[in-house]
Amino acid sequence: MFSTTRSTIHSLRISLTRPSLLPLAPIFASQRCSSSTPQAQTYVLKTPKGTKDYTDQDMAIREQVFSTVTRVFRRHGAVTIDTPVMELKEILSGKYGEDSKLIYDLADQGGESCSLRYDLTVPFARFVAMHGKSYHRFKRYHIAKVYRRDQPAMTKGRLREFYQCDFDIAGEYDPMLPDAEVLKVLCDALTRLDVGPFTVKLNHRKILDGIFEACGVPRESIRSVSSAVDKLDKLPWDEVKREMTEVRHVAPEVAEKIGRYVKLNGGRDLLETLEQDEMLQRSSTAQEGIADMRLLYDYMDALDVANKTSFDLSLARGLDYYTGIIYEAVPHGEREVGSIAAGGRYDNLVGMFAGTNKKGQPIQVPCVGVSLGVERIFAILQAKQANVKSNDLQVCVVSAPGASLLHRLQVARQCWDADIPTMFAYKENAKLNKQWEQCEKAQIPLAVVIGPDELAQGKVRIKNMHKKDPNQGLGTLVPVHDLVDELQKRLAEIQV
């Protein structure tokens, strides 16, 4: 085989020299060049539309958000779970109303049609239904990414890939107690995140549905009309009314009646107004919602969160699975960001997946929860914070001329062994001014200064880098064997 191949190649070389084949020679030469000299590929360096990279300072803010809300969630007894980033397509289909078009569907590559999760609520309901009675009464939190094929607005925190922080209570309890606790969790989390003043807008799906019924909206059109009302936070009433009449085919006189209600907001006073409304008194659905809200206000007063809420009849929440109270947190003066948290009660969602019990009755696990929009909260905090410290470093080991790299390593090892985050310059003969610059850039509060004279005495110096006091010089002398204790003492004082 080898000799045949060589002879074939030899014949080809000879043939290409013949006059009749000379025009083909450049072609073969070109092919040899292209195969032996690959062209460098150029790339358009960008992230996909609706996504972004996060710098170390961005991640420091995000981790601060996660740790803050996690402490709040766990203080209320919640445990965390995780679910796949993708779900079977049938699990997500039909749960999000008109927003279902925003679900990312994946190519079928293994005999199953899957979609990226749109939120964390429907996967949670599937989890509860799938794992039986062990999870029919519990509090859970979940922090994870979700995906929506939305039109992104990066500066407003509206992305296609983003994090949600969810807190939910599953199980049957006395009415409105879990709902009140979820609102307490929401208010505590936003307060501790220091997003600034905010209002939690409240409404009840049964009150809203009762209003639509009383105004003459057919039952089969209620969700469609509700989706139109949900746009009142972005559009004036005239445009919403036009959509109702021209797109949703609501009679103009019915739309006028709805308008008189959905423009109302207040507190207990609005609840009293609705209780006395003759049209709503004839709606059993509205009366059930009003009774729930009355009880909720009693509990919110006891938990000291009623003053952070507003009873707003324009709040509709477009997702189909809500069945009771709904809410949305809006920061004051942040119109460009929009709502930063939202949620509500969804009593029938688990039942869609759980099937029936041995008696043939539907298995229902009532749930209520809230989801914090991390990216929008992040946008607010990022605007408020400058020079964010993205590392945990507390000590920088600095050597003066005459002290070796080995001395820096020995001191760093002492600090690391004592669980003190520490750094030093990766250079044998590091210049002193460069070491100071490195320390200041990393925003490190304390420097341990090693010098030959100090080492001869068995001592080092500790300098407070936050104090711009020229009188402290290179710092205070400390015996090497007392270094760790002194550092821990000073760091405790700085953190206080």
Image (cartoon, rainbow, N blue to C red):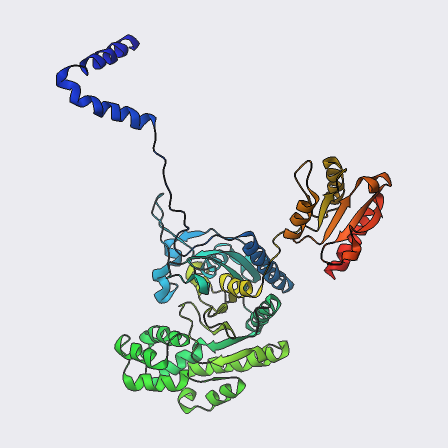
Q: Nearer the viewer, residue 329 or 222?
A: 329
Q: Nearer the viewer, residue 334 or 79?
A: 334
Image x and y of residue 25, in percent: 20, 21
The residue that appears at 44% across and 78% down in the rendered structure is 206
Residue occupying the far left of the picture? 20
Image x and y of residue 319, in percent: 41, 68
- Does residue 112 lie above or below 3 as drawn? below
Judge from the rendering whether residue 326 lies leftward or rightward of residue 99; answer left or right: right
The residue that appears at 57% across and 66% down in the rendered structure is 384
- Does residue 319 lie above or below 478 as drawn? below
Residue occupying the far top of the picture? 3
The residue that appears at 36% across and 60% down in the rendered structure is 102
Q: Residue 67 occupies which quadrant of the picture? A: bottom right
Q: Residue 315 occupies which quadrant of the picture? A: bottom left
Residue 94 can be seen, yes or no: no
Image x and y of residue 139, in percent: 57, 62
Q: Residue 43 occupies which quadrant of the picture? A: top left
Residue 425 can be seen, yes or no: yes
- Does residue 15 lie above or below 168 as drawn? above
Judge from the rendering whether residue 259 lies leftward or rightward of residue 5; answer left or right: right
Quarter of the image with the C terminus is bottom right
Question: Number of numbered discs present?
Answer: 0
Image x and y of residue 156, in percent: 45, 65
Quarter of the image with the N terminus is top left
